[in-house]
Image: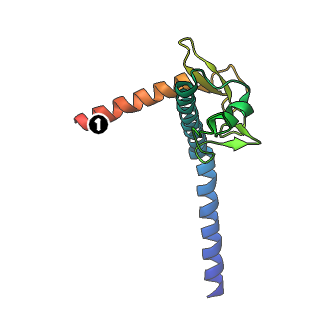
Amino acid sequence: MQRGCVIATISGALVILVVSVLYFLFVWPDQQRKGTSACIYVIEKAMGEYEADFGSLPEGGNGQVAALLLGDNTREKSYLTSKSVVLRNGQFTDFWKNPLRFGTDEEGRPQVLSAGPNGVFGDDDDIDSQLVREMIRIEAEKDSTTNAS
């Protein structure tokens, strides 16, 4: 009886270990990318709302932009909550714990940029506002195609 319990416990632990390893190898990286994309979208939208109220985008470094959007502005208006983004030490970060960068694109729209998994800006794994907008457009097209069927 005891031997059967030991074998069942070891088997269960091995199954949990294998599932955990597979999750962190194949599922978690995609979740980090999607989570970072969602944060970029939320921050970009909040920056646009801030611009509509104040006539200009929030200025300053990451920490200053975070403070302004979280309500430390002359109107004391919060444009997002700390639960809707990833904050570390008063700065917006991506899901790889790297600080985000802010700027504007060619059309003057707010742009938020993540260095991606490797933490290096300017290479192929970066995630920016333009990429997020393209992903949203593709998802919307998929949804409309699915709903039309």
Front in this rendered view, residue 52 or 64: 52
Q: Position of residue 62 (x, y in %)?
A: 72, 30
Q: Which residue is found at the position 30% from the left and 32% from the top?
A: 144
Q: Which residue is found at the position 62% from the left and 81% from the top?
A: 5
Q: Is residue 34 left or right of residue 95?
A: left
Quarter assignment of residue 89: top right
Front in this rendered view, residue 102 or 80: 80
Front in this rendered view, residue 12 or 51: 51
Q: Position of residue 108 (x, y in %)?
A: 56, 14
Screen quadrant of the C terminus? top left
Screen quadrant of the N terminus? bottom right
Query: Circle 1: is it few (<14), some (14-19), or many (20+) Cα within 10 Å?
Result: few
Front in this rendered view, residue 1 or 22: 22
The residue at which mark 1 appears reads as 146
Q: Position of residue 97 (x, y in %)?
A: 72, 39
Q: Is residue 142 left or right of residue 68?
A: left
